Image (spheres, helix red, strand yellow):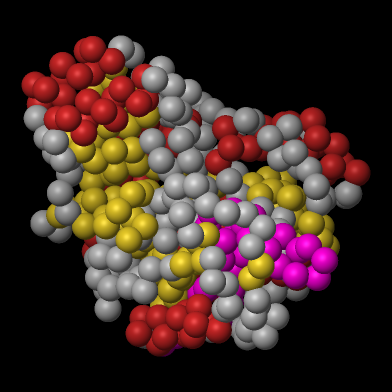
Amino acid sequence: MNILILGGGGREHALAWAIRQNPKCDRLIVAPGNAGIAGVAECADLDVLSRADVLEFAQGNAVDFVVVGPEAPLAAGVSDALREAGFLVFGPSQAAAQLEASKTFTKEICDACGAPTAAWARFTDAAAAREDVTARGAPIVIKADGLAAGKGVTVAETIDQAHAAIDSIFDGEFGEMSVVIEDFMPGEEASFFILSDGTDCLPIGTAQDHKRVGMGDTGPNTGGMGAYSPAPVLTPALQDQVMDRIVRPTIAEMARRGTPFQGVLYAGLMISDGQARLVEYNVRFGDPECQALMMRLGGQALDLLLACAEGRLSQTGVTWADDHALTVVMAAQGYPGPYAKGTEIRGLKALPETSFQMTFHAGTAERDGTIIATGGRVLGCTGRGATLAEAHQRAYALIDAIDWPQGFCRRDIGWRAL
Ligand code: GLY
């Protein structure tokens, strides 16, 4: 098969690395890719948000299967354009991608299918939103009602923080015109990844990530500074509960509305007293959770994504090893605030690249034979082992072999489970 992956981050490097191992994969193209992805696939310079450009590229390159990595092309309807033209695609339609693109949409789906989630209200003007927060008290959760690259959520500990978050959303920080205000849910957060072909569902792994930039889960939110899989808090019994009360009802409600969900549903969950409630849905793999998941799934990932796209999930299963994987993100100093670009990263070529240790590139490029940092989150050093401690040791061994004075990482990824 000729396979095209859209995206150019650590998630897409991990997808490409896993898919490349499957003998069904002949030609692998990633658009736009990055310096690490160039080691396992061809990189193509393509505007992945342009339906016309992606379609023309797929037609011109005899592509058999398209895997859409990030949410933005999904929200832009790229998968619809490809499907209408007869391509096999992994990734939901624009209508189904509303599960990530609109907080209000997800809350309405939860209400319609009875999925447990926090009580909520939506406001289109700042004064009414501020009044609601004052009446409900803190802690309270303020969300921009749209795609905000993982940054549109504030867990406000005080009314003042909540008011500031509301003001920044209505001041246009995210280009948004509405906010969703939710009750704060205490507990432990975990992520659950489920493939759905529109009718059937197949869980493919659990993970926990570290969203805060600082040690001990402190400091500002980021896209994720590290992750590990599996998440011990999501026991098999709890996974069954989530499938029965949250995931299957959601998939059935989406189908009932005539907008079936086909792709990976990433359920962000809050666990408390043996009960799981939905925090949010994403309609793509988490980043860096995908890096840990792909290390565990390996080449079978392609078979699973194909079964999902072809509507064959009821006849498909996952082959699990009794293993653990852990990813540590190296970011440019200053991230998630302003950071320098173009600094040189040394030592990457000497690193092992095995099914136990992989360094996935997120924001890198090659310039005159050297690898330079081009983004905030730059590398995802991933270890896999029989225990989480072994995976942790292997991931940090990679980190310690990298020579990049302008980079940093958290040294405590996995602390909760370890
Ligand atoms: N790691 C969080 C996300 O991908 O949204």
Q: Is residue 24 left or right of residue 189?
A: right
Q: Main secondary structure of the magenta part?
A: strand
Q: Judge by depth and name the residue closer to the eye, 356 or 133.
A: 133
Q: Is residue 313 left or right of residue 163?
A: right
Quarter holding the C terminus? Answer: bottom left
Q: Residue at x 48, y 60 (%)?
A: 333
Residue 268 in magenta?
no
The image quarter in which residue 142 lies: top left
**Placement of 118 over or under 294, stated as above or below:** above
Q: Is residue 203 visible?
A: no
The percent position of residue 72, horizontal first and vertical second, equals: 58, 37
Q: Residue at x 15, y 16 (%)?
A: 131
- In this rendering, the count of numbered labels is 0
Q: Which residues are magenta?
A: 357-386
Q: Is residue 316 above or below residue 179?
A: below
Q: Is residue 272 visible?
A: yes
